[in-house]
Image (tube, rainbow, N blue to C red):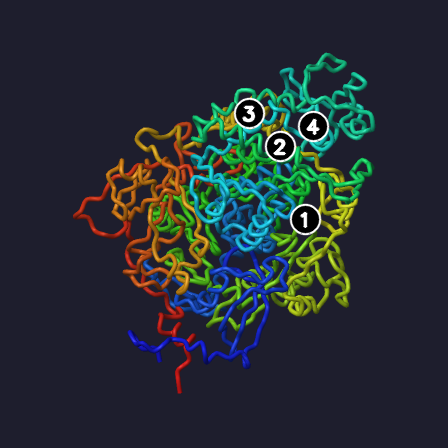
Amino acid sequence: MFKFLSSEPVHDATASSTADTEVKTTTCYMCACRCGIRVHLRDGQVRYIDGNPDHPINKGVICAKGSAGIMKQVSPARLTQPLLRRPGSERGEGEFEPISWERAYELLTERLGRIRATDPKKFALFTGRDQMQALTGLFARQFGTPNYAAHGGFCSVNMAAGMIYSVGGSFWEFGGPDLDRAKLFVMIGTAEDHHSNPMKIALGDFKRKGGRFISINPVRTGYSAIADEWIPIRPGTDGALFMALLHELLAQGLVDRSFLQRFTNAPQLVVLDEGEREGLFAFDPAAGPPGDGRHPHNKLAWDLASGRVVQAYPEGVQEGRQLALEGHYKLADGTRVAPAFQLLRDRVADTTPEWAEDITGIPAERIRQLAREVGETALHQAFELPIPWTDAWGKRHPTTQGRPVAFHAMRGLAAHSNGFQTVRALAVLMSVLGTIDAPGGFRHKAPYPRHIVPNYRAFNDPSMIKPNTPLNAAPLGFPAGPDELAVHEDGTPLRIDHAFSWEHPLSAHGMMHNVITNAVRGDPYEIDTLLIFMANMAWNSTMNTMEVRKKLNARGEDGNYKIPFLVVCDAFQSEMVAFADLVLPDTTYLERHDVMSMLDRPISEYDGPVDSVRVPVVEPTGNCKPFQEVLIELASRLKFPAFTQEDGTRKFKDYPDFVVNFQAQPGVGFLMGWRGKEGTEHLRGDPNPRQWEMYARNNCVFQYHMPEDQQYMRNWNQPYLDFAKDKGWRQRNDPVQLAIYSDTLQAFRLAAQGKSKGRQPPEHLRERIATYFDPLPFWYAPLETACIDADRYPLAAITQRPMAMYHSWDSQNAWLRQIHSHNYLYVNPRTAQEAGIEDGGWAWVTSAWGELRCMLRYSDAVEPGTVWTWNAIGKGSGAWQLAPAADESRKGFLLNHLITEELPFAGGHISNSDPVTGQAGWYDVRVNLRPAAPEEPAETFPQIATVPSAPGVLGGARKVLAYLVPRKP
C-alpha cells in the first residue's frame, strides 16, 4: 500500500522481472508521429511501453509522451459509460445520468434518421485530431450532409494547401526535408513536437555528419536550441523574408534555370491584355480547350532557339529547345504575353532585403547572406547520384541531380491569416533552387505528389442535398475554380462553417473553428445536431473561449437551445464534455483497432509507401467503445448504402471487418499490405480475411520499398507516375508541373473583377478575392492588424506545443504533469522591464478582444516584439479529474481568451482566418502588458466554476497508484 511521506520506495527496481511479462506491438498515439511501440503487459495490464526497434518510423526511439502512454490508459479522467444530460440541468454544469449503449444508439438512430429523411444538412460532424478521416468523411457523405470537417482548418491547412497547390505535396505526412543528403537545413516556424522522433533522429545524424542547421523562429526552444544559428523573426512576417530571398536569388542568378524550364510553369506564357483571359496562360485552340487546374497541359512557351511560340509540352521540352524565362512577346494574333518567370521577376523587384528588414526585424545584410548561402549550397555544392531515371516525355536522365538545401516549416507559417501566400512563397523559393523531390531537398511521400489541382472535388451542388441520399462527392476537396465552390446561386455558403464559399474558397480541410458561432447565429441556416469527436471546443480548441462557452448554452426566443442536440465523443472528461447532451465514451489507442491508411493519413517514407495499424493490447475500460465502432453501428442502423446489402442487412460486422472488406476502388482498401485471399499480394488486391492477423505478426506496419529509379523527381518520373496510377493513388499518369504562377488563383481573381463568365462573388467580397487571390506570392500584414491600434497593442503573442505534451490530451497525464503542471508567459527581459513587470511576477495581458492574468518569466530566447507560452496547459477547474485547485487551473492559462474568432468586415463580420483557405489566424493576435496589482489574487484569470465528476469516471490518484504498485503480501 502506498504510504504518504514514507521513505519506502514506491517501486523497487531491483525486484523487477520480465519473466512473466507479455509483449505486444502496436502504434503509438500520444502525438501524430505514429511511432511503433512495444507494450509490456503483466496479468493483462500495461506495465511498460518502449519504442519498437523494428519499426521504420522511429526505429526504437521513444519520447516522454510515448513512454507515458501507460498514464493515459489509467487516467482518472477516463470516461467509462455513455451519459445523458440530466433533465433540468444546464449545459456546462456537467450533470449526467448513465445510460446503456443500446439507449444511446436508439437516441441517435431516431434523431439522425429523422434528420436524414427530412433535411440532411442539419446534421454536422466535426472531428479533432483523429486519423480516420476516410471513415468519418465517408460517414458524412453517406448521411448526405456537407457539414463535415476535421481539425486541419485550425491547424495547418495553409501549409497543406499552399504547397499542394504549388508543388503537389507538402510537409508533415506528405513530404519533408531529405537530411540524409542535405548540407544545409533551414527550419522555419516549427515547434518541437512536429514529427518529433523522426525529426530528432534525422537531425542528430545530420549534425553528426557536419550539416549546418539554421532555425528561423521568434522563439529559440526545442529544435531551435540545437541550431547552429538562430535567426529571430517577428511572427507573421516570414513571407516578407521569402520574398526578399527570392529578390536576391533572382538578382544574383542563383536559380536552377534548366529545372525551371523543364519542370515548372515558369516558361509558360501569361496573357497580359485585359479581358477574360487576362492573367491566364495562353493556349493553342487547335490543341483543345485552354489549360486550367484540372487539365493543365495546353500551354504555350517562347522558344528562343527558333524565335517562335511552341507548345510548352511536349514540344517545348524537345532536344534543342531553349524556352524563354524572361521577356515580353506577342502571339500571332497580337496578344501580349510574358513568361510566368518574368512576372515573378517583376514581383520581387522591389522586395529588397531593406524592405524586408523593416517588416521582419532581420538585418538586410543577414538576409543577403542567407540568400547567398542557400543559393550557393544548392547550385555550387550540387551532386549527382548514379541513379538513371526516365521523365514524362521519354527522356532518359543518366543521373539524378542533387540539391543539398532542405527546408522545413509548419504552423509558425500556417497559423496566420497571410499563411497561404507565405507558404506559396516558400514553395516557389524551393522550386527556383530546383530542390523539389531532389536528393538533399524536399522529398515527397506516397501517395504524393498529387496533381495541381488534386483531382478531389469537394461537394458543391445544393440540388444534391436530398433526403436519404448520399452526396455525389466527398464533403472536402480541392476546388480548381469558382464553379466548384459550395455556394448557392446567390453566392451564399452551402456549409455551416462557410468553407468552400467566396469567403474562404480553398478551405480544403473545412473550418471547424466557425461551426459553433455560425450554428448559434443560424448562419447560413440552423442545424439540429452537432457531433463533436476528439475536439475540446469549450476550451483550448476554440478562439474566444469564454464567449464560445456562452454560445454552447445559448437559447432562442422559444427557450430551446440554438444548437438543439450536442453529442460529444471523448475518452476523457474534458471541458467540452460538460456541455454535451449525450456523451459517448471512446477508448484509448491501446484498446482499439485503428489504421494509418493510404486513403487517409499514411506514415510513408521517402523511398516508398508505409501504412500501419493499431491493435488492442488490453480490453476496453469499463463500457467504452471505439468511435469507429460507433460509426459503423450507426451507419448500419441508418442503412447507408455503402454499409448495407441490397436486402438492407448490414454489410460489415464491425470496424475490423469494414477495414478488411471496404474497397474505395477494386483492389484498393484501407490497408495495402498482405492483400489477396492468401495475403500474398501487396499494394493492391482482393480483401484478405486474415489481414489484421498478418499486420499484428509484422509489428503492425507494412513498408514497400520502391525501385531506386522511382524514388526521386516523382512529379515527372514516368515509371513512378505509371506505378502510382496502377496502385490507385492517382487518377492520371501525366506530369505535375510546379506552379510558380497559379492560374487557379487567377481564375478566382478574374471572377472577382467581373472579367470572366460563370460564378461571381457577392459584391462585398469582390475586393477581398481580387486582393488575396494573387497568382504570384506576396506578403501582406495579418488581417487583425487593420482592425486594431498597433501602437496600443505592440506585441505579437503566440503559442507552441511543448515536446512533452500534445494538445490537451496529456495535461491529465500523471507523469507528464510533472514536467508541465502550469505555464508562464515568456517575455524578453527588455520588454518586460519596460512594462514594469518582474521576473516571476503576475501580469495582465490584454488584446483588442479580451484579457487574462498570468505569471511572467524572463527569457532571452524570444525576440523582443513577441511574447509566447505553451499551448493547452491551462485547464478549467475540475476538468480532466484534476483537483479544483490544481496548478493547471490556478496557475495555468490559455492564450485563446485573447483571440477572436471573427473580425469586423464590410459592416458585419467574417472569420478570423486566411481569406484563401480559412486557416484559423491563431498567431495574429497583438497584445500589451501591465503588472498586476499586489492585492490581486495570485491565480490566473479568467476562472470557471468547478466542474463535478462525471458518473463512471475512472477515479483518482489512489487507483492509479494501486494499478502501478501492487499491494504487498
Q: Name which residue lies at 51% across and 25% down.
A: 771
Q: Are marks 1 and 4 in contact (CB under 8 Å)?
A: no
Q: CA distance from mark 4 to mark 3?
A: 34 Å
Q: Amino acid at mark 1?
A: Pro
Q: CA distance from mark 2 to mark 1?
A: 32 Å
Left or right, 274 with respect to 825, comes to right
Q: Amino acid at mark 2?
A: Glu
In the rendered structure, find residue 752 and report the number of the disc placed on it.
3
Query: Picture coordinates of residue 881 (x, y %)?
Result: 35, 64
Residue at numbered disc 1: 447
Residue at numbered disc 2: 376
Element at badge 2? Answer: helix
Q: Amino acid at mark 3?
A: Ala
Residue at numbered disc 4: 257
Q: How many marks?
A: 4
Q: Is residue 342 above or below residue 570?
A: above
Query: Picture coordinates of residue 676 (x, y %)?
Result: 76, 63
Q: Give whichever of discs 2 and 1 has the lower sequence position.
A: 2
Q: Are marks 2 and 3 in contact (CB under 8 Å)?
A: no
